[in-house]
Each structure stands twice: as C-alpha cells, then as structure tokens.
Image (tube, coloured by chain):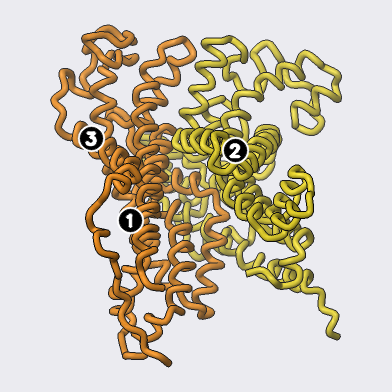
Chain colours: A yellow, B orange
Amino acid sequence: MKIRDPRLVLIARRLAVIPLSLLLVVIISFLLVALIPQSTAQAIAGQGASKEAVIAINRKLGLNQPLLTQLGNYLDRLVHGNLGTSYYSDKPVASDMLSHVPATLELILPALALGMLIGIGLGTLGAYRSGKLADRGVRMGGSIIQATPEFLLGLLLLYVLFFRLHWLPAPTGQLGIAYVNPPYHTGLLVVDAIIAGQWSTLGDVLVHLVLPVLTIALPLAAVLARITRAVVGKALVADHIAYGRAIGLKERRLIRYALIDSRTSLMTFCATLFAGLVGGDVIVESVFNWNGVGQWAISAMTNLDVPAIQGFVLFSGIVTLCVYIALDVAAVTLDPRIRLGHSS
Amino acid sequence: MAIAAEPTIIRPVGAQTTGTREWTKSVGLIAGLVVLGGLLLMGWFLPLRYGPNALGTGKVLQGPSAQHWFGTNQVGQDVFARTIRAASTDLPLALEGTALATIVGVVGGLAVSTRSRASEWVMRGLDAFQALPLLIVTIALVVISNNSLTMVAIAISLVSGPFYIRLVRSQALALRESRFVEASRAAGTGSFRLMIRHMIPNLRALIFTQTANTAAVALLVVAALSFLGVGTVPPTASWGSMIKDGSEQLVTGQWWDAAFPGIALFLCIFSFNLVADGLRARLARSRALEPE
C-alpha cells in the first residue's frame, strides 16, 4: 500500500484543480462580456436604429434575461461543445476561430524555437563569461530590447529590412499578393506548400515569416537570456561543478551539467512564455497583417462580437491551462528533485 | 519564545555621507528619474510653436526641418508638438495605473500572506485568472467602457496586479515567520498595526523596485492599447497612436512620424527599468546593513 509513486500523486493533485480552474475561466470570460451595457444591441443594430430593432436584437440574443439565466444558458451550450454563433458573420465561433489557429501556430512555434536558441545560448555565454565583455554586451543588448515595445521593434525591422535594404517582402501577411494559398491539408502553409510541391510558394511563405518571427523571437530571447544568465550562473558555482573542474573534466562538459541542473527552471519559463503566445500575438499580427487568432480576436473586439470574444478568452485560457499541466508532467518526469519531494 | 528587539537599522559611522563611489552606482537611477521628470515637465509646461492638435501647420509629411523639428504627419500636424504633449497624457496615465496596481499588489499580497486554506483558494483563482489572455481582456474592458481612461488604469492593475500579489505574498510569508514579527505578535500587536509597523517597512525594497518595474509595464500597456486604437485615441496625442499612424507611412519611407514618438516611448520604458535596477541596487545595500 506504501508504493505510492509521488510523481502520480503530484500529477493527480494538479489534475484535480483543472475543473475548478476551467470553471473560473468560463465564469470570468462570461462576466467580462456581461459587463457590456445595453449598448451591445445598439452597436449591432447600428447608430440610429429604431428602438424596436434594438429590443428585437436583445430578445434574439437573450440579453434581456437575468444574468444568472444567461450564465446558465452559456454553460449549457458550452457543455454541448457549442461556443455560439458570431453576431457578425453568423458563423459558428468555434470553427471560425480554429480556422485561424494554424496561421498563429506557424508564427509562434518558429519564434519560440529561435527565441530559446538565442536566449539560452547567449544567457549561458553570459553566465560562463560572468563579468566579462560578452556578459556585459549580452546584458546591455537584452535591456535595450526589453525596453522596446514589440510594435516598435517590428516597425524598426520592417523599415530597415524591407524599406531600406529590400531584403524582405512587404507586410502583406503570410503570402505576397501574387501568390495563392496552396491546397488545404493542415492549414499550415509551409506544410501545405510542401505537400503540393509548390516550391516557389514555399519560398514566399518562408520569407514572409522572417520579420514577424524575428519580432517575436528577439524579446523572448532577451527575457530568456536574462533568466538563463541567473539560473545557469547559479548552477555554475555549485560544488559539483567545482569538483568536476578539480578532477579535470572538460569545460564543455561542465556547462552541460550546469544546463541539466537548470533545465527544469528554464523549461518553466519557456512554457510560461509559450502560454503567453498561444492566444496569438495580437500586436505582431496586427503590425504584419497576419491573419491569425490574434487579429481575429481584435476584430471581434472592435465589433463587440460577444460570443467571439468569449470563445477566444475561453480558448486561450484552456490552452494555457493545458500548457501548464504538460509542464508539470514534464517537470516531474525530468527532475528527480521534484519527484523525490526535495523541491522547495 | 525569546522576545527580540524592534528591528533597528544599524548604520556604520559615516554611512550617511555619500561618497563618490556611491554616486556612480546611482547614475542609472538618477539618469532615469531625470529623463522621466524632464519629459513629464516638458509635456506639461514647454511652450510649443504649434498646438499639438493644430491641423495644417505646414505641408503634410514633411521631413524634419528648422520649422518642424520632428517633421509633420499626414494631416500636417507638428510631430514635435505632439510627441512632447503626449508625455503629459501617457505618463500620468501609466503612473495612475501603477499606483492602482501597487495598491492591489501590496494590499492583496498582504491579505493572502497566510497559509490558510482561504489564501490557497485565492491563489488558485489567480492561477486561473492569469491563464486568461490578459491583453485581450484589457482591450475588451476598455472598448466596452467606451475608451474610458479610468478603465485603462484599472486594466493596468489587472495585467500587473496578480504578479505583484504573488511577489508580495512570497516575501511576506517569509517575513511573517521572522523573529521580530513573532515577538511583536506575542506582545499583542494587532494585525493592522503589524502591517504598518513591520510588514510594509520591511517589504519596501520589494515594493519600490516592483513599482518601478510595474510602471514600465504600465506604459507599455498604455502604448500598446493606443497603438491598437483603444484607450487614448486621436485627436489626443499619444505615443502609441502616433506610432500607429506613422507606421502607415513607414513603408513608403516617411520614418519621422513613427520614429520620434517611438524614441520617446523607448526612453521612458528604459528609464523606468533603470530606476528599478538602481533602486534594487541601493536598497539591497541598505538592507545589508540591517541586522538579520
């Protein structure tokens, strides 16, 4: 009876909070939009619409019912997997939103990979060469990028790399105007172009990716470099590293040990950053006319498209929760300190 | 239980006189405050040749010149006047939000700084809240409130409040277990007095630093919102909306309309970060002089 795997206990405990967190996310997403004053119907009907038209819209959307009834209806629909219908396009919110997810994924996955590569690489360099020129350079560069808002960085890159140097194409979204989308398979244009064997389209997709990916990756790299610098720096002064050096292990090897020591914390930060991005990077998508979930959410917002906003908030909330759970499972599996209950 | 004395700050003789070395260490802090204060004062008081909202002060989209130091935008407004004046809308708004976030963070953080079941529940609630796309939530709130600036300040506290609460809570939990708090409680100090006399003064390093960090985030939120067309909207000059307007000209080469407000924004955020780092360094030193 004593053979309780602490790993399972930990994961089970985490899983147990999920329904609660989910319910909270649902309620918050509902309340958020329920705060909208009577003007929703007015906004939909348009300025100068007759009073009758506004009342009719209110009735049709159930906005005239008490808040609790509305919440009940909302939960009931959710349980049946129905996120509602957009006030504007009259299309189901779920499928409308999901059709924009691939574009966002295509943007944030390479950006995250690049950001991790640069950030962890430079952060480790800074930690290893602590106090030296490389360290100070990395820190200086990082603090400059961290003080640059994403939209400013995006515009700067756009001005230099597109307008001045003509290395990269205009911000027309995922493809140049001369190209059409490859036949739909996965929704990921890179993959679809490869499947269809349209190599020039693939090239165009890739060059259009560079600017927005850089714009997301550089700030990520700056944050990660700072964190890596701190975490790996601490690991590098640990006793076992000093011992390793004393018995003549190669420096390369010592760095690897320090990185293994730090990987749980680094993974946590990467997952947090990823979770922040899955909802689509609203600002970068808007700068580069990227037709992802972020842009979609912004247009829903300006139209006061209530079901769409709720659907989006709910979607991002759920994805974020999933990322955190995956993180916990990974952390428990990778880190014996947590598994054995030595963590602080 | 031993009753410890009130924590007194022991300063070595001569610690009050600030030596040259101390000065150089605070250069970032002072520079940051000078830039921020200077921009704010200029935004309020600098007499401008053209009104920030005056249309057609010159030809449209003219580059920087003696007449228009920062050029003109697509409706012929003077970019210099707008960039300077925007400081008096953006910075106070960001500071209001920061003040609100600080109140939320300190009061909230102290309120849940117990290991009771209720605080655990609140923390789980915060987890769920932070799982939401907060920028989108803020945009929604500001749009719904019809671009009310009060809502922008509230939105800032929603974005940075939860993190602030976490920070205060984690330090306050440790502090509560320290000897002098225990002693004070044993001597019958009520919880309100305990907060004012012991907790807040001992959290001041964290609070000052985190407030400066929050100000940087707050300014970023203000700018991002107006870049996306909510919050401070034209005709009011604001760096975010100026950059947005300027971005449309950027791809045809008229860089000044976006660049100058961009530089101002960058300088402010950088300065807030400098202030945060400077405060951290200073307060870490004065902390080291306190008895454990």
Query: Looking at this view, is A74 or B6 the one in front?
Result: B6
Could you tell me the amino acid type at mark 1?
Leu
> Label 2 crowding class (10 Å Cα cut-off): few <14, some 14-19, many 20+?
many
Height in image: B291 above or below A65? below
Height in image: A40 above or below B184? above
Query: Looking at this view, is B133 or A234 the one in front?
Result: A234
> Label 1 crowding class (10 Å Cα cut-off): few <14, some 14-19, many 20+?
some
> What is the distance, in whole Å, between disc 1 and disc 3 at their CAs?
23 Å
Question: Circle 2 sits on which residue?
Answer: A221
- Residue A194 % position (x, y): 83, 23
Element assignment for label 2? helix
Q: Chain of mark 1?
A: B
- Residue A29 % position (x, y): 53, 55
Question: Circle 1 sits on which residue?
Answer: B100
The answer to whether mark 2 and mark 3 are in CB contact below 8 A is no
Find residue A197 and report its image quarter. Answer: top right
Question: Circle 3 sits on which residue?
Answer: B38
* Residue at x 51% of width, y 54% of height: A62
